[in-house]
Amino acid sequence: MSTRSSRLAARGMVAPSVVLLLIWMVIPLSMTLYYSFRLYRLLSPDRTGWVGFNNYLWFFNAPEFWQALFNTLALVGGVLLVTVTLGVLIALLIDQPVKGQSFLRILVIAPFFVMPPVAASIWENLFMHPQNGLFAALARGFGMQPILFLEQYPMWSIIGIVSWEWLPFATLILLTALQSLSSEQLEAAEMDGAGAFARFRYIILPHLTRAITVVILIQTIFLLGIFGEIFTTTQGGPGSASTTLPYMIFKQAIAAKDIGRAAAGGIIAVILANIVAYFLMRGLGRNLDA
């Protein structure tokens, strides 16, 4: 049983790391919050001052803000739907005892180690290019006109690219959870006459619930900040069709050189991320406690 002195000693040893973490988080957030209320443009450094909520009002009144917000949520939801659904199916497939199983698993998780701009460039030039891409060659082979994916379906294209990148992560987590399922339980269900779909619905899927929850929570955190794929392929276009909130903030910080507005956008993004995380934890958190 720990004594008061041992508890104080433990807290004393942990304190430096906690203080360092707070400094690491609080200082950048405080500076961002400070500049979000100020006029601070790099192209006109002589014009400064306190502008209150004007930077925030500019974002809310900007024509592309609500489109960017919708695109951000659509990107997160679309990628989660694809990666969780296909992740479960692929995990079930590669969990079967087949020849070359180890190599197959390495091949499945390989895309996760490709840098986002590189992955986007591969898809843009090797697959989606309207003249030299694989999809264009297949379309011409069937006597059809090639589809201009990044021009006609920009958000769907971005969702497809990001899903390809994150599918290995979901598959790996789900495969690990699947391998912890007792084979005796499945064999008993099969002997009782349960078909493949019934075993999946009543045994495998409930067993994967916690793993699916982990995948959704972790991926959502990272997907809210997706930027490299959009910058490499569509640059937020055509128009603002594929502009997300992170890319809109980038345009204010780098293209417009308006640090005040970019800081306000950053605070809005932080608030949005916390709202999404709150509802996710309320809706899915109970699965982690089960």
Image (cartoon, grey):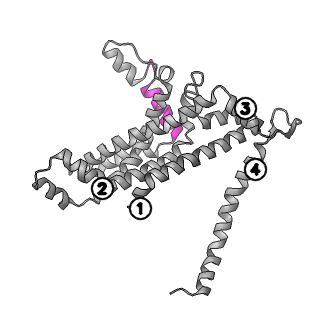
Percent across and percent down for residue 144 are 35, 13
First-in-chain label (3 vs 2): 3
Secondary element at image label 1 = helix
Q: Are marks 4 and 3 in contact (CB under 8 Å)?
A: no
**Image marks 3 and 2: residues in contact by CB distance under 8 Å:** no
Q: Which residue is mark 3?
A: 58
Task: Tell me whether the residue at label 3 lies in contact with that at label 1, contact meaning CB atoms closer than 8 angstroms.
Answer: no
Chain-order first, disc 3 or disc 1: 3
- Identify which residue is drawn at 10% across, 55% down: 191
Local crowd size for mark 2, using a 10 Å CA cut-off: few (<14), some (14–19), many (≥20): some
The C terminus lies in which quarter of the figure? bottom left
Q: Main secondary structure of the magenta part?
A: helix
Question: Between disc 2 and disc 1, whose residue precedes?
Answer: 2
| Camera-nearest residue between 110 and 191 | 191
Sequence-first tag of 2 and 4: 4
138 relative to 113 in the view: left or right? left
Q: Circle 1 is placed at which residue position?
A: 289
Instruction: Give the magenta range.
Output: 116-132
